[in-house]
Image (cartoon, rainbow, N blue to C red):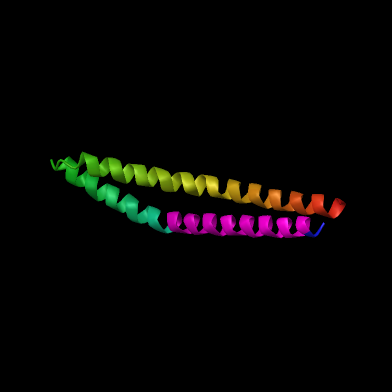
């Protein structure tokens, strides 16, 4: 029984650590996205003037897509982790 309590505590700590990391990534995405969008606009303007920077534009678009994916999925992952944590607590309380 004592081993189960220790295991439960370790899982809860791990879940909290993952939630913290996801929140940090979400904050970074929210703060970095406007900067990258501005950078993309500048690069596209230079391309319109004839500069060959299509590789740079593609890189910026990939980074923006990654940030947008983080912003979209992070809340879902956090909710799922919180549900897992609650289920583990409920199972433990029933024992």
- In the displayed orientation, state which residue is furthest to the left: 50
Question: Is residue 13 within the magenta segment?
Answer: yes
Determine the residue positioned at 67% across, 52% down: 82
Placement of 16 over or under 73, stated as above or below:
below
Residue 32 left/right relative to 38 = right
Image: 59 above or below 6: above
How many circles with numbers are drawn on the protein? 0
Residue 13 location in percent, x, y? Answer: 64, 60
Is residue 85 positioned above or below 53 on the image? below
Would you say residue 17 sits in the magenta stretch? yes
Magenta part of the protein: which range? 3-30
Query: Is 91 left, or right, of 31 in this rendering?
Result: right
Q: Residue at the spot x=74%, y=52% of the render?
A: 86
Q: Where the N terminus falls, by quadrant?
A: bottom right
**Could you tell me which residue is drawn at 28 percent across and 40 percent down?**
58
> In this orientation, which residue lies closer to the viewer: 66 or 47?
66
Residue 66: x and y in percent read 42, 45
Residue 42 % position (x, y) = 24, 50
Which is nearer the eye, 72 or 78?
78
Question: Quadrant location of residue 29?
Answer: bottom left
* Secondary structure, magenta segment, majority class: helix
Question: Residue 47's image quarter?
Answer: top left
Name the residue: 33% across, 42% down. Answer: 61
């Amino acid at each position: 029984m004592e081993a189960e309590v220790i295991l439960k505590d370790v899982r809860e700590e791990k879940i909290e650590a993952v939630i913290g990391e996801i929140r940090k990534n979400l904050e970074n995405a929210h703060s970095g996205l406007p900067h990258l969008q501005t950078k993309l606009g500048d690069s596209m303007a230079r391309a319109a003037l004839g500069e060959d920077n299509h590789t740079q534009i593609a890189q910026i678009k990939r980074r923006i897509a990654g940030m947008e994916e983080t912003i979209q999925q992070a809340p879902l992952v956090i909710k799922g982790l919180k549900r897992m944590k609650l289920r583990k607590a409920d199972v433990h309380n029933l024992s």
